Image (spheres, rainbow, N blue to C red):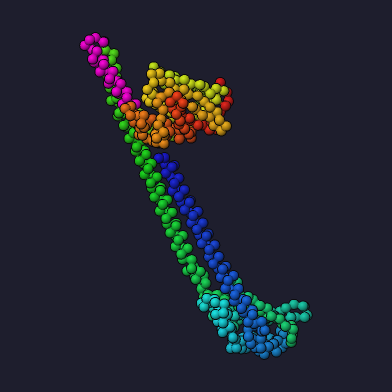
């Protein structure tokens, strides 16, 4: 395994984990915002509607308007005049009057009972608390046609609080802010706000989201664990693959060396003078050579099937007729006298993108099987091309014994030997190796018996693998 390949996986894992964490964090934040919004839309709206109905005949709260009219309204003209005349005691006068007014409002407020009644009637959470706050008092200055602030207090300033125990106020928990105006004795308007919330709403929402947090953390932990295990397994598999490749190469070398020695020795025995004393030796030499070749073919077939999974296809563009003819000529030489091989060229100088070794193995195994599973005196195999709308098809037909219907589904399985294999040499790897090569090339295969009793193999290749330019 290359160093670059080893390093890319931790980076890929780290990046994926970071993206996943950010995504889950984003979803959690959105879930929190949704819970927060549901609170505002749900409970606050109910409080707003119920409170609005309760003070329909009053300006502030039941009985609050009378306090306002008695404790503050009669003094507005005096206060206004002192401010406009820039009297030295104007500020102190205003502080005293507002302080007396707010104290009176706090003593006579009926908001506690009103709020408890609203919570009960609307079936709200009893844990809700509120704050009623007097925000601002403005008087109209006819001289410049403007409203002038005589008193102002923000929601977090407890000086303007009338009733309620809610400590933290914000736009999110403000039920409403209402402005009330009148013209007597001088034009004035005042603004007050009602805030409703839990003592610590953020923490309550977070507690409600604990299952979401835990599930998210569990998902992250599972993904990290699975990713780590997958990476470790991949590393171990690569090590095993490298070890297997080294082992196969070693076995191939160690096996071929004595096998080659046996074949050379067998040739030496065969090439001796065929005198009476040597005939038996020559015959034994031929037996040794034949069995050694058979053993070599089996060994190469097994090694090829195992090593194929580790190989990478080398795709090149070659003239399909020229390559096929060269391969078949080589096979004719090898199987001279055993089978007649006929090839009908595709023509038109068409090139095909393929791996030459895979293509050779496919044709070699097809011809080998046509010889092995054929009881005819005159064995023959014929290769022709057919062109469809979206693909080309290499049709390979022999005059052998055909394939039993019960064998077709398992024919391409490793070490499978069908009913026609009884009494015939082989390991059941030929068609498995063919199918493996076809899968690597992205080709497909179909089998059927011919009318004459032989077997027809259809190998389908998509048009994109072909190039119809003329070859020089």
Quadrant containing the N terminus in the rendered view: top left
Q: Is residue 91 above or below residue 289?
A: below
Quarter that holds the C terminus: top right
Which of 30/417 is in front? 417
Tell me what residue is drawn at x 57 percent, y 77 percent: 122
Q: Nearer the viewer, residue 70 or 448?
A: 448
Residue 55: image x %, image y %? 64, 82
**Measured along the vertical axis of the image, is residue 256 above or below residue 226?**
above
Q: Residue at x 36, y 41 (%)?
A: 239
In the picture provided, is 18 more to the left or to the right than 170?
left
Q: Image quarter for residue 307?
A: top left
Q: Where on the picture, by quarter, is residue 413? A: top left
Task: In the displayed orientation, state which residue is furthest to the right.
Answer: 143
Asked whether 116 or 407 is in front, the reply is: 407
**Residue 136: percent from the left, percent from the top?**
66, 79
As for residue 287 lying within the magenta part, the answer is yes
| Direction from residue 378 to residue 184 in the image, left or right | right
Label the magenta part by its dominant secondary structure: helix
Q: Position of residue 67 (x, y in %)?
A: 65, 88
Q: Is residue 180 above or below residue 347?
A: below
* Number of numbered labels in the structure image: 0
Q: Residue at x 36, y 32 (%)?
A: 418
Q: Position of residue 192 (x, y in %)?
A: 64, 79
Q: Which residues are magenta?
A: 274-297
Assess whether residue 75 is covered by the magenta stretch. no
Can residue 356 be seen here? The reply is no
241, 304: nearer the viewer? 304
Q: Is residue 471 left or right of residue 269?
A: right
Residue lying furthest left = 277
Q: Is residue 371 above or below residue 142?
A: above
């Amino acid at each position: 395994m290359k160093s670059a390949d080893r390093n890319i996986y931790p980076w890929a894992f780290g990046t994926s984990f970071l993206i996943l964490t950010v995504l889950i964090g984003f979803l959690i934040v959105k879930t929190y915002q949704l819970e927060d919004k549901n609170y505002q839309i749900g409970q606050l709206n109910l409080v707003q509607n119920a409170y609005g109905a309760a003070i329909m005949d009053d300006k502030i709260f039941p009985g609050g308007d009378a306090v306002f009219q008695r404790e503050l309204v009669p003094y507005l003209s005096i206060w206004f005049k002192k401010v406009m005349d820039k009297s030295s005691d104007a500020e102190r006068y205003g502080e005293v009057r507002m302080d007396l007014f707010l104290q009176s409002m706090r003593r006579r407020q009926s908001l506690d009972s009103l709020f408890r009644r609203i919570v009960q009637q609307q079936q709200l959470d009893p844990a809700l608390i509120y704050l009623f706050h007097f925000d601002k008092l403005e008087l109209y200055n006819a001289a410049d046609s403007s409203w002038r602030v005589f008193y102002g207090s923000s929601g977090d300033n407890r000086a303007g609080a009338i009733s309620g125990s809610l400590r933290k106020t914000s736009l999110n928990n403000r039920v409403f802010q209402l402005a009330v105006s009148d013209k007597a004795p001088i034009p004035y308007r005042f603004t007050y706000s009602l805030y409703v919330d839990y003592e610590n709403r953020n923490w309550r929402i977070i507690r409600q989201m604990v299952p979401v947090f835990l599930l998210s953390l569990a998902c992250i932990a599972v993904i990290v664990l699975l990713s780590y295990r997958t990476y470790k397994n991949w590393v171990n598999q690569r090590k095993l693959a490298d070890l297997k490749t080294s082992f196969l190469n070693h076995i191939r070398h160690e096996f071929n060396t004595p096998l080659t020695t046996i074949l050379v020795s067998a040739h030496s025995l065969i090439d001796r003078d065929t005198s009476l004393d040597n005939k038996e030796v020559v015959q034994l030499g031929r037996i040794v050579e034949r069995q050694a070749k058979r053993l070599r073919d089996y060994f190469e077939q097994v090694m090829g099937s195992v090593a194929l999974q580790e190989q990478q296809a080398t795709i090149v563009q070659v003239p399909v007729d020229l390559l096929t003819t060269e391969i078949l000529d080589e096979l004719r030489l090898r199987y001279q006298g055993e089978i007649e091989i006929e090839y009908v060229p595709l023509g038109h100088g068409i090139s095909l993108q393929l791996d030459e070794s895979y293509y050779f193995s496919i044709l070699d195994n097809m011809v080998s099987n046509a010889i092995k599973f054929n009881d005819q005196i005159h064995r023959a195999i014929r290769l022709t091309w057919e062109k469809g709308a979206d693909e080309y098809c290499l049709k390979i037909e022999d005059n052998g014994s055909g394939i039993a219907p019960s064998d077709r589904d398992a024919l391409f399985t490793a070490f499978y030997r069908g009913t026609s294999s009884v009494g015939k040499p082989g390991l059941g790897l030929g068609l498995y190796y063919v199918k493996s090569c076809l899968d690597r090339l992205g080709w497909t295969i179909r089998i059927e018996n011919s009318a004459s009793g032989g077997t027809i193999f259809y190998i389908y290749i998509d048009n994109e693998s072909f190039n119809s330019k003329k070859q020089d």
